[in-house]
Image (spheres, rainbow, N blue to C red):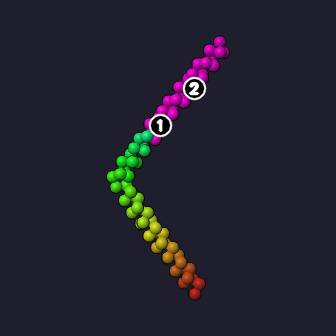
Amino acid sequence: MPDTFMKSFVNTLLFNLATIAAVIVGVVSYAYRAARVWYANGGREFLMSAAANFAAGVNKLSEKIYFKLEDAEYA
């Protein structure tokens, strides 16, 4: 009797793990395909523009901090 229960438990566990793996593979393949299409349809330019805007913002913020510290030094 315990042997049958163990076989049933292992069988159910394997099927559950296979289902979870199939769902993960499906989601990842969908996300990869969507990202590939987005990148091909102008995503590269968007990323480059966003990176340039971020770098300009960081530069502006660092200049403000630098000049505030410089003014505080001479005050």
Quarter location, residue 7: top right
Farthest residue to the right: give it.
2
**Is 5 placed left or right of 65 in the picture?**
right
Q: CA distance from mark 1 to mark 2?
A: 18 Å
Q: Nearer the viewer, mark 1 or mark 2?
A: 1
Counting labels gives 2
Mark 2 crowdedness (10 Å alpha carbons): few <14, some 14-19, many ≥20: few
Depth check: give the residue in front, 71 or 35.
Answer: 35
Q: Amino acid at mark 2?
A: Leu
Pick whichever, 51 or 71, lies toward us. Answer: 51
| Residue drawn at the location 42% of the way across and 44% of the way down | 31
Q: Which residue is mark 2?
A: 13
Vertical relation: 66 (above or below) 9: below
16 magenta-colored: yes
Q: Which residue is mark 1?
A: 25
Place of residue 2 in the rendered image (x, y in percent of width and height, measured from the top left): 66, 15
40 to the left or right of 67: left
Other-residue count near label 1 (Cα within 10 Å), few / some / many at <14 / 14–19 / ≥20: few
Q: Earlier in the sequence, mark 1 or mark 2?
A: 2
What residue is at 59 percent from the left and 84 percent from the top? 73
**Residue at (37%, 59%) from the top-left corner?**
45
**SS at circle 1:** helix
Q: Could you tell me which residue is drawn at 47 percent across and 37 percent down?
A: 25
Residue 38 in the image: x percent, y percent? 36, 50
Q: Secondary structure at mark 2?
A: helix
Amino acid type for the residue under numbered disc 1? Val
| Magenta stretch, residue numbers | 1-28
Q: Is residue 22 above or below residue 74?
A: above
